[in-house]
Amino acid sequence: MELKEEELLDESNAALKQNSSSCQLIKATTEQLPQEISLKDVRQVSPAALAYLGDAVYELHMRMFYLLPPQRVESYHRLVVSQVRAETQAKILRSLTPYLRDTELEIVRRGRNAATKSPKRLEREIYQQATSLETLIGYLYLTDSQRLTELLQKLQLEKP
């Protein structure tokens, strides 16, 4: 029984380390932005553009998280797609909401209001929540990578 618990702890520590690695990648990429973007400039970026950026950052985070242990490309794809689906993103936003600051909640609101048209397969509310999460991630990527890392580490991701 003790061996099983040790194995679970080792797996848990490995997952945390991998999550941390993907967060370190985000930090490294923000440190190498070609130019400093002022908060004034970021506020002029539309919520849709922030969501566009946030979508890419979030997917990269998920790809890094699932990179180890090595798997077939099809397996990587399946795992990542399950996390970047609008339904999953909506659930993640709801789990993060209690941790958000007032300014972050305002960005979430802006993202929700910008998502006016949703795909036919989705309820409008789900699409708005997913877009809100992407908007928040895009905003934090540009303004506060440390805070973005902090929030991404709160995700309860599990390895297969």
Image (tube, rainbow, N blue to C red):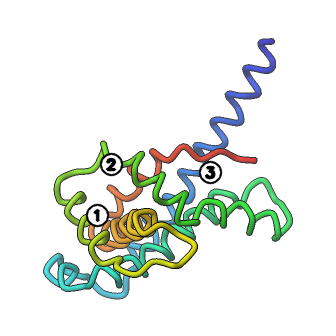
Name the quadrant of the N terminus: top right
Percent across and percent down for residue 134 are 41, 69
- The numbered mark, 3 or 2, whose residue comes first in the sequence reads 3
- Find residue 26 and report its horizontal and vertical position in percent: 47, 66
Report the amino acid beneath label 2. Answer: Thr
- Identify the residue under disc 1: 108
Q: Tell me if mark 2 has few (under 14), some (14-19) or many (20+) residues whose alpha carbon lies within 10 angstroms of its own.
A: few
Q: Which residue is drawn at 30% across and 78% down?
A: 114
Residue sticking out furthest to the right = 72
Q: Tell which circle, 2 or 1, labels the residue nearer the N-terminal end.
A: 2
Given this view, does label 3 or label 1 mark the residue nearer the observer? Answer: 1
Residue located 63% across and 36% down the image: 13
**Cα distance in 3D space between marks 3 and 1:** 27 Å
Q: Position of residue 37 (x, y in %)?
A: 24, 82
**45, 95: nearer the viewer:** 95
- The quarter of the displayed image where residue 42 is located: bottom left
Q: Which of marks 3 and 2 is in front?
A: 2
Vertical comparison of 96 with 88: above or below: above
61 on left or right of 153: right
136 versus 41 height, above or below: above
Q: What residue type is labelled 1?
A: Val
Tell me the crowding category of disc 3: few under 14, some 14 to 19, or many 20 or more residues within 10 angstroms, Cα based.
Answer: some
Which three-letter amino acid code belongs to the residue tagged 3?
Answer: Gln
Q: Which mark is residue 97?
A: 2
- The residue drawn where x is 49% and y is 58% is 23
